[in-house]
């Protein structure tokens, strides 16, 4: 989990993930086109995302294509965020039950 949080802590890496979310399966050149930094800097960010398991790289001939891997983010959601949603859902269910009870009266 530490590698995932470290990777997500950087704004540029989050931008790269957003780009892959919008259009999955991009090359380094395609990903560099929207950033004002060198290819080497983008490559370093992509390497850290790959190490964290947030992207998957596939070689197509001599071309390296990057794909978003949402599984680690889903794990973060399951472990850290979903428990807060459970409370919100319970409150909404109580409200619904309360409103339905008023209708019946």
Image: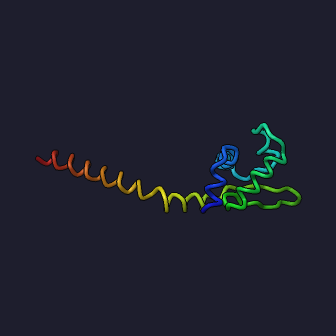
Does residue 81 appear left or right of residue 91 in this picture?
A: right
Does residue 78 appear left or right of residue 7 in this picture?
A: left
Q: Is residue 47 above or below residue 41?
A: below
Residue 104, horizontal then vertical, whole percent: 14, 48
Does residue 73 appear left or right of residue 82 in this picture?
A: right
Residue 105, horizontal then vertical, whole percent: 10, 46
Residue 97, horizontal then vertical, whole percent: 23, 52
In-front residue for pair 35/2: 2
Q: Quadrant of the N terminus?
A: bottom right
Residue occupying the point 82% across, 56% down: 64
Residue placed furthest toward the left: 105
Query: Toward which corner of the image does residue 30 lie, by quadrant?
Result: top right
Residue occupying the point 60% across, 61% down: 72
Residue 90, horizontal then vertical, whole percent: 31, 55
The image's colouring method is rainbow
Residue placed furthest toward the right: 62
Residue occupying the point 73% across, 53% down: 25
In-front residue for pair 4/33: 4
Q: How many marks?
A: 0
Residue placed furthest toward the top: 36
Query: Toward which corner of the image does residue 5 lie, by quadrant?
Result: bottom right
Does residue 92 appear left or right of residue 20 in this picture?
A: left
């Amino acid at each position: 989990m530490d590698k995932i949080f470290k990777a997500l802590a950087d704004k540029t890496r989050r931008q790269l993930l957003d780009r892959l979310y919008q259009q999955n399966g991009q090359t380094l050149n395609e990903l560099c086109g929207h950033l004002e930094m060198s290819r080497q800097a983008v490559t370093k960010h992509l390497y850290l995302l790959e190490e964290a398991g947030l992207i998957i790289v596939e070689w197509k001939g001599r071309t390296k294509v990057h794909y978003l891997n949402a599984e680690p983010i889903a794990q973060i959601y399951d472990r850290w965020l979903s428990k807060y949603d459970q409370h919100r859902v319970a409150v909404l269910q109580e409200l619904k039950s309360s409103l339905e009870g008023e209708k019946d009266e």
